[in-house]
Image (cartoon, grey):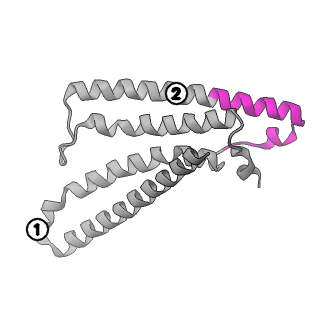
Amino acid sequence: MRLLNALRTVERTVLIGLFLLMVFLYTSSVVTREIGGSFASRFAWIEEAVRMMNLFLVFLALGLALERGKHVGITSMRDRLPAPMLALLLKVIDLVGLCMSLYVAWLALDLVQFVLRSGQRSPTLGVPMGYIYLAPVLGFLLLALRYGLSLLGLIDRYQEASA
């Protein structure tokens, strides 16, 4: 559990840092456009950087959102099931979620390799596009980790959703 707590801390720190950096960059971009004149054209890269950071922000938050019960779910049937059936259903949901998350991460990794081989780069930053496609790989691996931990009973991701 110490490793999981450390992972949570790292995830939160990265997410907060990314969000604050996005706000700072976008605000400075707006201010620069208003008062900068031709000088503002040097900061065209900011919008692309913020878009890339937003992708990572969304995908890196998948695991934490699942663990806290913040993903959209319809609980009307789940709330009416008897305890033994509910326990089985929750395990099936976790197993299917684990398998799907690992499959999507694997597909995304395949896409990363394909795009890296193509040599495609982002227009203003010149970053290899394959690095940007790492966001879904990381996000779905973090999601799979949470599904796996829930399946093994190491975390109770349903407690927060019903509270």
Secondary structure at numbered mark 2: helix
Q: Nearer the viewer, residue 15 or 77?
A: 15
Give the magenta-colored segment's residue range.
73-96
Check whether the beta carbons of the residues at disc 2 and disc 1 lie within 8 A of each other: no
Q: Nearer the viewer, residue 34 or 62?
A: 62
**Above or below, 99 relative to 6:** above
- Where residue 96 sits, quadrant-wise, is top right
At x 30%, y 37%, the residue is 131
Q: Nearer the viewer, mark 2 or mark 1?
A: 2
Q: Residues within 10 Å of mark 2 (few under 14, many from 20)?
A: some
**Above or below, 68 relative to 33:** above
49 lies left or right of 38: right
Residue under pointer 1: 39
Q: Main secondary structure of the magenta part?
A: helix
Is residue 78 a member of the stretch shown in magenta? yes
- Which residue sits furthest right? 82
Q: Quadrant of the N terminus?
A: top right
- Which residue sits furthest left? 38
Instruction: Point out residue 119 in the picture as x, y percentages from the top left corner.
Output: 19, 29
Q: CA distance from mark 2 to mark 1?
A: 46 Å
Residue type at numbered disc 2: Leu
Q: Residues within 10 Å of mark 1 (few under 14, many from 20)?
A: few
Instruction: Point out residue 32 in the picture as x, y percentages from the top left corner.
Output: 20, 70
Q: Quadrant of the C terminus?
A: bottom right
At x 47%, y 40%, the residue is 139
Residue type at numbered disc 1: Phe
Any mark on residue 16, and which? Answer: none
Instruction: Point out residue 54 in the picture as x, y percentages from the top left corner.
Output: 39, 51
Residue under pointer 2: 102
At x 20%, y 33%, the residue is 120
